[in-house]
Image (cartoon, coloured by chain):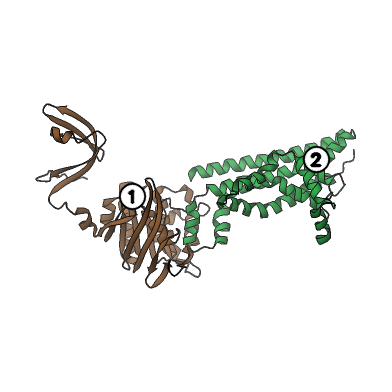
Amino acid sequence: MTVDIQPLLLTFKLATVTTAILLILAVPFAWWLSQTKIRLKPVVETLVSMPLVLPPSVLGFYLLLAFSPEHWFGRWLDRALGVSLAFSFQGLVLASIIFSFPFIVHPVQAAFQNLPKSLTDAAKILGKSNMQIFFRVLLPNIKPALISGTVLAFAHTVGEFGVVMMIGGNLPNSTRVASIAIYDEVEALHYATANFYSAVLFTVSFVILLIVYLVNRRAKNATSLY
Amino acid sequence: MLQASINKHLQGTNGEFLLDIKLEVTEGELVALFGPSGVGKTTVLRCLAGLEHVSQGNISLSEQKWLDTNLGINVAPQLRRVGYMFQDYALFPNMTVRGNLEFALRKGANKQRVQTLIDMMNLGELQNHHTATLSGGQKQRVALARALASEPKLLLLDEPFSALDAEMRARLHDELLRLQKSMGITTIIVSHDVGEVYKLATRVFIMNAGRIMQQGAPATVFSAGQSSGKFRFTGQILALEPMDVLYSLTVLVNNQIVRVVVMPDEASALKIGDSVMLVSKAFNPIVFKLA
């Protein structure tokens, strides 16, 4: 049996890039969501949570339409930036970001909301700027939520199938991630290869989730003292 | 000199009320805001610190204007140089005791100040502990040290000793007095403990429903009308029963149950659950010294 490990590498590359971008986008967004009093907040929260309940194929379908050169958005991307998102790695990254957004926003937002407001007040009185407060007081005190959110977003991206199927297609080295490859190999009756990919994904997912639970348990022990 | 006039609508348990107070505190003085909970004491401190929006008023500390709603001046809390001790202490759980104090230092401040405060507040053994592992009294000492670490011009203490037992409280009272005197910081303490106010403050402002009802030296204010040699106790009626031609009245006073007799016409005006004041001549009482 010769196994092409490209799909696995691509999967982890996709998950790493997605998670890194998510951290930069979702953490400030979660903070904003935890503080805001705008009337549209329920609508914003609903939109963020939609990927949790929507069949991935629905999201994939709309993204595919939007990315296609027939659509104004796809055309604009193509003309202005020279990027074509349909059936490309960049397209997968964008779709994964949207798809895994709630997995990081939810725990981080909840953690921000649970921090006593007096911590921010105390830091303000000690002369600290909003940036200093965010990075030196707020973020360090939501570390467990940050870790579990990050890990979950990573794991969820690894496990993606429907969205990738819709907008990525099955291009080797570009969009053929492990979950797609498994489907492919099974269709071609290459059970040994499919088993190899599956075993790797199973092990990685198990380890990742185990880390989340261990971190949460440690955090719970720590906060019980607080 | 701290001068403040604050106007603000507050939401209380009995609906909205207006916080409307004027304060003047001389430099280096320690004064107390005294009153039941929910009358706006904490809000006054938060307004002084700049944490709360003031609808109308002005605040200035020795020629420095912090707030003037008419001129549109509102100095950010970061620039007011206030030391604030929160009721929940608000220690940063991600930092050690020493870390909390170092975080409070101003830019360019001498690091030695942290060591001085650690020695002063007896925190040497705890300095590398995380604040989550500390007891209430220890947290309180760290919070006070942290408030002082930023070299404040005004120290605001929000019921700092409420969660402590009597012995610890007395010790920390002494410590606070010593520190406050040696540093000469203008200090406002919120309290609803008469003994505490008596011991710490040179002047007390008695607040009720958003207003200052009375102010003066604690000895004068608290004993006003009581210097006639009478005991006055307030309590709650637990039982009211006829007894021959009189009525027996059972009153709960400070966790003690007291039984007294009242005349039938007095009894007719009373019912169970009423708050009452018992007054008695303090003539020839028996005095026991407690260990």
- Residue at 32%, 49% in the rendered image: B36
- Amino acid on which disc 2 is placed: Ser
What percent of the width, then of the height, locates residue B197? 28, 55
**Residue B90 located left or right of residue B32:** right
Which chain is the one coloured green?
Answer: A
- Farthest residue to the bottom: give it: B63
Count every numbered label the image shows and give the total.
2
Residue B64 figure quarter: bottom left
On the image, the x and y values in percent for residue B163 come to: 37, 47
Judging by the rendered image, the residue that carries numbered circle 2 is A179
Q: Is residue A56 visible?
A: yes
SS at mark 1 in the image: helix
Q: Hey, what amino acid is under mark 1?
A: Met
**According to the image, label 1 marks what residue?**
B168
Viewer-closest of B83 and B262: B262
Q: Are callouts 2 and 1 both on one chain?
A: no
Determine the colour of chain B: brown
Dot 2 falls on which chain? Answer: A
* Number of other residues with Cα within 10 Å of mark 1, as a class: few under 14, some 14 to 19, many 20 or more: some
In terms of depth relative to the viewer, which is nearer, B140 or B282? B282
* Local secondary structure at mark 2: helix
Q: Nearer the viewer, mark 2 or mark 1?
A: 2
Q: Residue at x 33, y 68 (%)?
A: B27
In this orientation, which residue lies closer to the viewer: B144 or B17? B17
Residue B229: x and y in percent read: 12, 49
| Residue at the (31%, 67%) spot, across then down | B26
In the rendered view, does A62 fall on the left or right side of B21?
Answer: right
Q: Classify residue B7 as left or right of residue A54.
A: left
Task: Measure how far apart labels 2 and 1 are at the Cα level.
Answer: 63 Å
